[in-house]
Amino acid sequence: MEENMVITRRQGLVSFSVGALGLSTSTGLAAEGSAPFRDFESLPAGVRMRQGGYTIDVCLSGADTVSVIKYPHDRKPPLGFFLPSTPSDSQATFKNGVLRLGKISVSVDSAVGRLRFAKSGVSRLEDLGGQDLTTFHLAKEADLYGLGQFRDPHINYRNKSVYLAQGNMDAINPMLVSTDGLGLLWDTGTDSHFTSRGKSVEFTNPSPVTRYHVFLGDTLEEVIASYRRLTGKAPLLPKYAYGFWQSQERYNTQKELTDVLDGYRTRNLPVDVMVQDWGYWGDASHFSGMVWDKQRFPDPAGMCRHVHSQNAHIIATVWPAVGTESKVYKALDQKALLLNVPHWSGGRVVDMTSPEARSIYWEHIRDGLLSVGLDGLWTDGTEPEFLSTGSRYVTTQAYVSAGLSHAGPISEHSLTFSYLQAQLLYNKMREHRPDRRPFILTRSAYAGQQAFNAITWSGDIFASWQTLRNQIVAAQQMSLSGIPYWTNDIGAFLVTHRFPKGLASPSYRELYVRWFQYGAFLPIFRAHGTQIRRELWAIGGPDDPCYLALKGALERRYALLPYIYSLAAKVTLEHAPLVRPLVLDFGHDQKINAYPHQYMFGQNILVCPVTTPLLHDQEDPYEFLPNYAVKGHAGPAAEVIFYEGENFERKVEERLTDDLKMSWFGDLPAALKGKPYSAIWRGKIIAQETGRHKWRIFTQGLLRFSFDEVLKVSSKGSDSDALNRANGAVSFTGHEGDDVYFFEADLVKGQVYSFELTQSQPKPDAVSLWVEWITPSHAEDMKAPPAKAFEVYLPKGRDWYPIGTTKPLKGGQVIPLKPALDDLPLFVPAGSLLPQTPGIKHAADTVSETEVHIYPGLDAGFDLYDDQGDGFGYERGEYSLLRLKWHEARQSLTIGRIDGNFDGMPQERRLKLILYKGETPSIHMAVASTAGAKSIKLG
């Protein structure tokens, strides 16, 4: 059965008689910019009222959650995707203008038109009202996190602004959380501008419908759990998905893919998932047509059988855009179920809001892809993408320009495309194969998407040390927004812009190793990209230090799979975060703010990725200007005007952008295809630090660039007819045909500088513009220090063991390290148990013995989870838990009985207990069983 797009409110909840509740309906005097509430009526666990031309519903959606919907009087209540989850026996009350459930209350100030949200009588948040712009007042100024994942992430959103819109490298989950246990899910479903100023938080809304949810917890972790209870539990992925994913842009034949897998097996290297990227369908007219090119993929079912015979699994990419000669295109086009905006492939994008379109789309995926034996799907370009692949402004403008979809104006649901696609595929795959867990890799996100086994990755990022840093912050922000499964392209998708020699560059090889080590401590461990090979042996032979470092990180990931799978069970069963920013566990320690690239992986491993070069200077230290540094003169972003003709003859399109870059034909308006063009870019740049900045601009044709009202670059350009290989594909390998210009300027942090850039391009379809800088601090960071030293911070309140050692270090101190290339700094807090299974080569490998690594100092516990590894038996309680408890005072370990049951569950489990105490770890053997618990003295 097709899934419901809009879920109706649960019935049978507590209802009220307004007249009996003594609710004041006095209008009083309205506050400036507000109107009084009036015309109250009761709702199940809530109240409905009027304000101006709007109806406002306020409902208690759970023990600590309040949902608010504001909509025009002439509309039906638009409830969105999420069912309010108030239990039927709730004791909600509504009296004297206050709605209560347990400790939660909402005060309706009928005189001035405001809503106040409180817990235990303490005000936490106030809605000051508004439609196009809604302003909230925080009870206190707090650090703010979440909102999804951005190419240029803020570490903390306090006193910051950000555009909440989907893009290739930006995935939005508009869930804002604060350190004092407040959550606000801005659930309008459309792009918004978020701004924080002191205690004020603002969201713009281009839709006539405003919908948000307030979570009132005591901790950040409670807020994340409340978000998941409202929007959907994150199911378990199949066990193999927590192993290593080998991917490449792209395997050109099925033999190439199977040979790579065989290369892992013959080298005795662990791997679990093989990924087939785009193009397997043949020419562009069959783009993502759910078919296989008979010359290059003559037997896709045989390819899948081969992968499965090697104890691995396989997924392939599918897009929401389909080529014009494909059967799926024709079926959709016949019923006008495609969006009328061009896609860069030449095809069109499916209207994912249409149940009929989704049904047709699914049938072709089922018959053309899943039928050959694929285990999962990679859904690319799900913002959705049209011609341009980068800018959030351009992506949103293109989507909204399609006008109407089946669900109505696209301007009212521009964020939710990937949610609908993931929902469709998860429900249908589960129905189609009820014994197997679906999993979906997607380039976008929205609130609740975690309920569909959807894994977001961060898009086509560019290789650099700064990008690595940004990705570490992005992973943490996505986790704090409530979505647990996230990954990125290890080593970045695009390499040669900064590292033209690719793997022949020692500086890139160092970066790749450090990125790979970090990737081993993400929920999903995945190598992917273009321009260089991504197999481990591509970096060097079996004795190469880089290869050995990669092999060591890969084997460590697999050794930790019982720990990781147990963490995944807590994600599902307890709504826990897997990636844990330090603020979750050490918010009391202000020093953690200076170390934003460290995080906890579960509660037992502190991960300290190496984020600066220690061996080789980054050969090209320039960076793109971050999005938050580029603004408009009268708005949130810079303005761009495109003209047909090289001399600004005819205006074609105006845009907003916060990205001073164009790198392929899709970045131009469609009307300029095959034509000379010109453009004017205007805006302002906010300096992020004080000092001398170096600037670089790549381009073609005539360029003039004025900065701070001073002309810095003026050129007629090159007469070269060289091919610009940045043209027409994201996989460009250099800047052939480009001119490059340099200048320097002194900037003062926080000061605003105007700029104007004009382009004149006589060559049709020649697209290249890259404005970059080197900030003073970055110039120093990209130099390898002579001492090869790297600092980590150990949060106070715990002692910390360097992993695998017996001597703990005191928390609250900075530790200088000199990590070798094969060493990722990892620390285990005192009072931790780490289960491991060294030596396995795939997630379902036979395990004869499980190691339990004991780091003493405090009492500790760990619930070791296991199940069949696939299917949904765990939802029926078919899993086992082995509870382990370390008693510090007695220096003993209690090994609980193996509780639970599932098909194939071993009745005994051999344990190798390793206690990190004394000069060297001590080793003890034990057996856990279903028969009963036991306690073993170790100290």
Image (cartoon, rainbow, N blue to C red):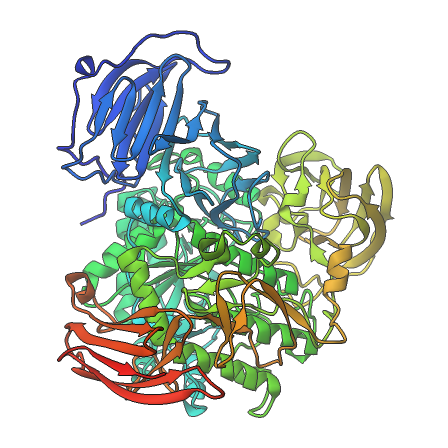
Q: In this rendering, is residue 787 above or below 76?
A: below
- Viewed as shown, does residue 197 lie left or right of 577? right
Write down the quadrant of residue 641 in the picture.
top right
- Which residue is nearer to you in this view: 142 or 700? 142
Q: Quadrant of the C terminus?
A: bottom left
How many numbered markers are drawn? Answer: 0
Q: Quadrant of residue 124?
A: top left
Q: Is residue 585 left or right of residue 574?
A: right
Residue shown at 62% from the left, 41% from the top: 657
Residue 629 as seen in the image, left or right of residue 210: right
Relative to the observer, which residue lies in front, 589 or 7?
Answer: 589
Residue 280 picture location, percent across and down: 42, 69
Find residue 356 and report its horizontal and vertical position in percent: 26, 45
Q: Position of residue 371 (x, y in %)?
A: 26, 68
Q: Is residue 294 above or below residue 138?
A: below
Please tell me whether residue 215 is drawn above or below residue 815 in the rendered image.
above
Nearer the observer, 823 or 1: 823
Instruction: Name the residue at the front extreme.
Output: 889
Q: Position of residue 253 (x, y in %)?
A: 44, 78
Q: Is residue 691 shown to the viewer in this render?
A: yes
Q: Residue 256: in sight, yes or no?
A: no
